[in-house]
Image (cartoon, rainbow, N blue to C red):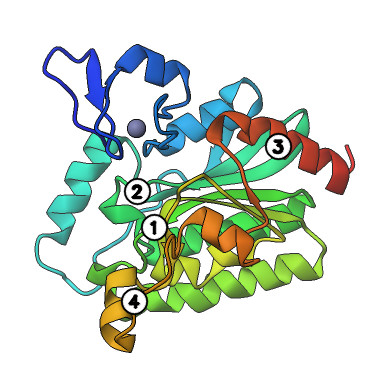
Amino acid sequence: MAKEYPNGLWIRCDNCSEILYKKTIEKNFFICSKCNYHFRISYKKYIEYLLDNGELEEYDKDLETKNPLNFPQYKEKLIQLQKTLGIKDAYIYGVGKIDNIKVVFGAMDFGFIGGSMGIVVGEKVARSFRLANELNIPIIIICTSGGARMQEGIFSLMQVAKTAMEVGLADRNRIPYISILTNPCYAGVMASFASLGDIIIAEPGAMLGFTGPRVIEETIKQKLPEGFQKAEFLLTHGFVDLVVPRWDLRRTLIRLLNIIWKK
Ligand SMILES: [Zn+2]
């Protein structure tokens, strides 16, 4: 999140360094009025911006990890994040409505260990798809992640296959899945459910990929093209279907749902 000034009234844009009045930015969906930079926001804001009356009936709220590898200081970190963010892990889901159309809605939170996918995120994502299947309604997921959760090792990697399989099962039942990629979305999450949407929407300027550009450049010993891994670059290369500014996301979802789904 951007640097805040002591009196709490001003914040500095991470992209163009403009000093911005916080209230104006809040009213503008946390988008910089000068350069269109989309500030990172929590799952709570997406619920507020996208769902009818900002309401979500949350499922599996209390599911939490048991630190399967006894990774040092992991438990302490989880307790502290659970306290500050009010969530048990990096993903929440439930049932809500968009333009009175019932949907399963899920959202990741980058603030929780970089939105990394461990056992709980993987299990809850899988359950989201099963729920959409069971209720026979569309599913929408806000994705943002640094990848698999290092502290849960191989158990994290297993979630990649598991979530991808659940997307496939929902697909077989013709459940529409809209994935919304926000900045940043990488690695294990990008290599599984995030990139498998029937419709893939990205927020402007979002960085999306498997491995970061620096590592790729070092490996292939080549300079990467301008804008590589940015949402707009991926749109022109056919990986992303739409780049939609945050202020227009709800209207876009309403339009899409009314085309692809019955009421
Ligand atoms: Zn800016």
Q: Is mark 2 within 8 Å of ligand 1?
A: no
Q: Of the numbered discs in the image, which one, if any, rests on residue 110?
A: 2
Classify mark 4: residues with Cα within 10 Å, few (<14), some (14-19) or many (20+): few
Q: Quadrant of the N terminus?
A: top left
Q: Looking at the image, is mark 3 or mark 4 nearer the viewer?
A: 4
How far is the residue under mark 1 from the one under mark 3? 23 Å
How far is the residue under mark 1 from the one under mark 4? 25 Å
Residue 87 sits in quarter: top left
Q: Disc 2, disc 4: CB below 8 Å?
A: no
Q: Is residue 64 visible?
A: yes
How far is the residue under mark 3 from the one under mark 4? 36 Å
Q: Mark 1 or mark 3: which comes first in sequence?
A: 1
Q: Mark 2 or mark 4: which comes first in sequence?
A: 2
* Towards the viewer: 18 or 51: 18
Which SS class for mark 4?
A: loop
Classify mark 2: residues with Cα within 10 Å, few (<14), some (14-19) or many (20+): many
Q: Quadrant of ligand 1?
A: top left
Residue under pointer 4? 223
Residue 31 sits in quarter: top left
At which x and y percent is residue 82? 26, 42
Residue at image position (53%, 38%) is 58
Residue under pointer 1? 145
Q: Disc 2, disc 1: CB below 8 Å?
A: yes
Query: Residue farthest to the bottom?
Result: 220
Q: Disc 3, disc 2: CB below 8 Å?
A: no
Residue under pointer 3? 252
Q: Mark 2 or mark 1: which comes first in sequence?
A: 2
At which x and y percent is residue 133? 74, 58
- Amino acid identity at mark 1: Ser
Relative to 24, is 254 above or below?
Answer: below
At which x and y percent is residue 121? 43, 59
- Amino acid identity at mark 3: Thr
